Amino acid sequence: MKRYLFILLFCHSIILLANCAPKAVVTEKPLTELIQPETSPQKAASLRLTEEGKAYLQSGNLIKASDVLEKAITIDTSNPYAYYYFAKLRSEKGEHKQSLGLLSKAEILFKDNPFYLSSVYSLMGKNHELLFQYNDAKKRYEQALKLNAENIEAKEGMERLPK
């Protein structure tokens, strides 16, 4: 009986591992790769600042990140990446309504970029969730997953929502 259970568990483990093969995932590229010879100097400067702000944000230096991202938006008000990362920063600071305002602008500007638009919807979902707006959170997480079924933040958000 023990041998049978061992073999059954072993076979089950093999099946689970086979289904866990890595899938192709789109990842974020450095924003400086978007700079082309025809890119305007303002847009190029804004993208460089946004990349710098993103690095400060990831390292936890929210004050520097805020300064740099605000400057990126001032230089180029059509830079969706600056709005997105500034929204992430505001969300991390607990400023969820302000984050949602920035994300609304990013949503418009990312209309042709499904990867980032999925990230925008996911962060919107998280902000709504933290504001106890669960119906809005669910809607945004669903939008994120529709654009990118591999969006981990949206998947985890859906699991956290009350049933």
Image (cartoon, rainbow, N blue to C red):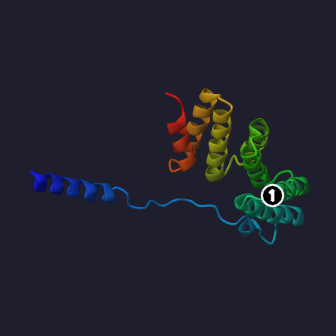
Residue 146 visible in the displayed image: no
Residue 26 visible in the displayed image: yes
Give how far across and how far down residue 125 sits, in percent. Answer: 63, 38
Q: Secondary structure at mark 1?
A: helix
Q: Residues within 10 Å of mark 1 (few under 14, many from 20)?
A: many
Seen from this angle, which residue lies furthest left? Answer: 1
39 lies left or right of 20? right
18 lies left or right of 155? left
Q: Residue 76 versus residue 63: which sits nearer the camera?
A: 63
Q: Which kind of residue does numbered mark 1 sit on?
A: Ala
Give how far across and how far down residue 32 sits, in percent. Answer: 75, 68
Determine which quarter of the picture holds residue 146. Answer: top right
Determine which quarter of the picture holds residue 37. Answer: bottom right
115 lies left or right of 53? left
Determine which quarter of the picture holds residue 130. Answer: top right
Count all numbered tags in the image, as a single digit: 1
Seen from this angle, which residue lies furthest bottom? Answer: 37
Residue ID at (67%, 45%): 120
Task: Identify the residue under disc 1.
Answer: 65
Give how far across and how far down residue 69 sits, in percent. Answer: 83, 56
Give how far across and how far down residue 135 sits, in percent. Answer: 60, 27
Seen from this angle, which residue lies furthest front? Answer: 2
Residue ID at (71%, 69%): 33
Q: Residue 13 versus residue 3: which sits nearer the camera?
A: 3
146 lies left or right of 29? left
Residue ID at (15%, 52%): 5
